[in-house]
Amino acid sequence: MIPILDLSTAQKTVLRRAPLNLWDFPPSVVEKTRALFGEGVTPPQAVARILASIREEGDAALRRWSALLDRTVPKEFRLSRDAMRKAWEMLPTDLASALRLAAQRIRAFHERQPLPSWEHRDENGVLGQRLVPIERVGVYVPGGSAPLPSSLLMSVIPAQVAGVETIVVCTPPEPHPTILAAAYLCEVEHFYQVGGAQAIGAMAFGTESVPKVDKIVGAGNLWVTLAKQQVFGVVGLDGLAGPTETMIIADGSANPDWVAADLLAQAEHDPLASAILLTPDSALAARVQEQIAHQIERLSRAEIISQSLASRSGIVLTPDLETAADLANEYAPEHLCLSVADPEALLPRLRHSGGIFIGEHSFEVLGDYVAGPSHVMPTGGSARFNSPLNALDFVKVVSLIGLTPQAGEILSRPAAVIAQAETLTAHAAAAEKRFSG
Amino acid sequence: MIPILDLSTAQKTVLRRAPLNLWDFPPSVVEKTRALFGEGVTPPQAVARILASIREEGDAALRRWSALLDRTVPKEFRLSRDAMRKAWEMLPTDLASALRLAAQRIRAFHERQPLPSWEHRDENGVLGQRLVPIERVGVYVPGGSAPLPSSLLMSVIPAQVAGVETIVVCTPPEPHPTILAAAYLCEVEHFYQVGGAQAIGAMAFGTESVPKVDKIVGAGNLWVTLAKQQVFGVVGLDGLAGPTETMIIADGSANPDWVAADLLAQAEHDPLASAILLTPDSALAARVQEQIAHQIERLSRAEIISQSLASRSGIVLTPDLETAADLANEYAPEHLCLSVADPEALLPRLRHSGGIFIGEHSFEVLGDYVAGPSHVMPTGGSARFNSPLNALDFVKVVSLIGLTPQAGEILSRPAAVIAQAETLTAHAAAAEKRFSG
């Protein structure tokens, strides 16, 4: 059951953000690590061991970890376009159409995103920034409790729009056919059935089978997250993903039936998922609570939902909508949904979230599949500094500096002065040569 | 002395990129860690210990580490605007003017950078991306063997241009007056004399004295880099910085005196710095080598330079300029300088570097100080996926999804179909309510 909380209780419980903690782990994870890796080995140490072995031994290590951790060793890590095509052809027509529509809308959305290279030319020459696609990108598609073809589309398509040449997809062995079909739909060439920390290691360092990439994106479980943290700097990363979370701000105009359904949808992802409703309307709060109790009975993932609702979720009574908006900024949720009569009035106040879903007709499930923006969004409060996956994640800036001889000479004098102050005399000498000789 | 290398030797030595390695450390670092932290403690473990203690104990831990590692405990960690103003007023006039010019040009350059929020409205509603400034940013300014006021300007000003509200600067205790003066010049309010891994911990977690930030930028030594890696995800990061590097592509038109001076300037940063010349012209190679031998004698940092030149640098003979360009793409240098007769002809071929310095009048030292683009650029080959620090580093994207009731209803059907395929029945139920009820 989802609790109704007053503000001060909520701030001590469901609204409280602790910094990402990759140092302390639940006993079950510690126990499993010990069973697989031996006494006294922590999860980060286990991951470090996996990564080091892949760096040194390549495929041989991949096969070993796949046998130990996935309990299967694929004959080939790479899956062919032919296998993808077959999976696509087996899809029910309505699913094929729905995925095709999703892909089109994701592509159209990201094609609207400006990637503005620029040059400024004047009498002193040219200065500018060139936005260049990253050459090789790795996309991790989680396996887990539900097959997520949508995650593949939401990561691969923005990379394609940005102009990435080589896109490598990794997902745990024996992927669900819908994931293969989604890969076929968006013309993935490099598809590997390698999962977990070993997939991150394979893409970061490269093996005989799996090409090395420049940047890795996509969410995964704890092992994937630990591995991503350890290869940060070896490759670029989109960020570290934690459990998903939704915050809905609603007033008396909201449909309690829909609000309840949206909270339940969020909660079914993960026992650690958060589904939080902020509302000043206690009558709405009560009706949503009732609706949740009623609707949950018919849902197949009721057990996951119950855990999420009881421990990480809540209906929080706020003095007014403005307070709710301020709480949202502080919490910086992955998804922020405005089920209020006048969402436009709240918009200017909202700064920190992955996405803003404006009005109850723009509910989160649309964003998960077909609205257009990537559903790979920053969790755990990282929306304070991170973005939903977007085309800018797949380019980098190259600064251009092209000064005329005259401008170069003039600027060499102040450059030499600063270099001297920094005691970098070879810098000063290089500058002085430009105006003294 | 800088060696002249044939291509195949160079590819096995100075041009060889190994992945960033934060697992193996030189014996001196291991030894120092052991002396300070005890038997069997690795540098990453020492850093983890520093970070954990700051997370738990705040200022008390900061004071302890400052005493142990910096051998001084400042009375106050925070330095006042008044202290900055005094440092500014003590500057020689020419240095004050040079820094003011640098600040102006850095600001003007980044103000030209588009930060394009956008909205697309049609009959289905609105979709878009809002670029929102990050609220609180930490800038690390290294102490080290030379005081670098320029690094403060190059990090703080792009953040200001992007609209960051709170900028926190940390630098080791008893900072050089020119760093304080630079902070005064660009109106820094939050300036702390805290260095090393403990500064990164203080900004990532917050202490009684030092405010918590959302993102940390700026280069530092190995301890800073290890600490940044460990707080990745707790805060955003610009990247991990390694030793600096310059690659010059030159042909027979280049002035060997200038090329030599530019290589020497690069080499004086660090014994691990790389200064690499690629040229098809063996006569130029010989003259540059001579010039280096000649010029080095008058330089104050000759010992650092000699180490860099002997171990990490070289003059590489390439078959032609196109090969040189391809080698540059593969190496992805921090700085790429084109001392060739027709630099514009090479430009389209160049994809991976932090900055491109077009023509020998646009030499790297200008970029270090006064050209305009930030000199904080990606090292170690990370230019394949990372950018020079720029205004985009200080904003994040918020996705906007505002569909009309009609569009929401229409899109709910394919969303429900995909949700069912993903076995997420609560997602499907939330979508079905929008078109069935």
Image (cartoon, coloured by chain):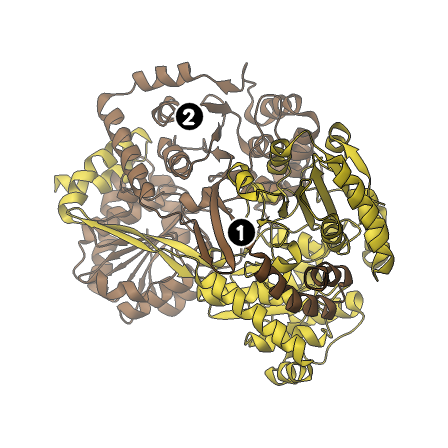
Chain colours: A yellow, B brown
Chain of the residue displaying label 1: B
Residue mark closest to the camera, 1 vs 2: 1
Compared across the picture, whether B95 is left or right of A190 comes to left
Compared across the picture, whether A84 is left or right of B111 comes to right
Residue drawn at the location 69% of the way across and 38% of the way down = A278
Image quarter of residue A85: bottom right
- Height in image: B179 above or below A125? above
Is residue A402 in sight in this rendering?
no
Q: Earlier in the sequence, mark 1 or mark 2?
A: 2
Residue drawn at the location 60% of the way across and 69% of the way down = A169
Image quarter of residue B77: top right
Quickly name the residue at label 1. B399
Give residue B404's position: percent from left, percent from top: 56, 56
Name the kind of residue labelled 2 in the image: Val
Give residue B175's position: percent from left, percent from top: 44, 23
Is residue A170 in sight in this rendering?
yes
Residue drawn at the location 71% of the way across and 37% of the way down = B39
Give residue B65's position: percent from left, percent from top: 62, 26
What label sits on residue B188 in the rendered view? 2
- Height in image: B395 above or below A140? above
Give residue A420's position: percent from left, percent from top: 28, 31
What label sits on residue B365 in the rendered view? none
Decide: few, some or many residues near mark 1? Use Cα within 10 Å; few <14, some 14-19, many ≥20: many
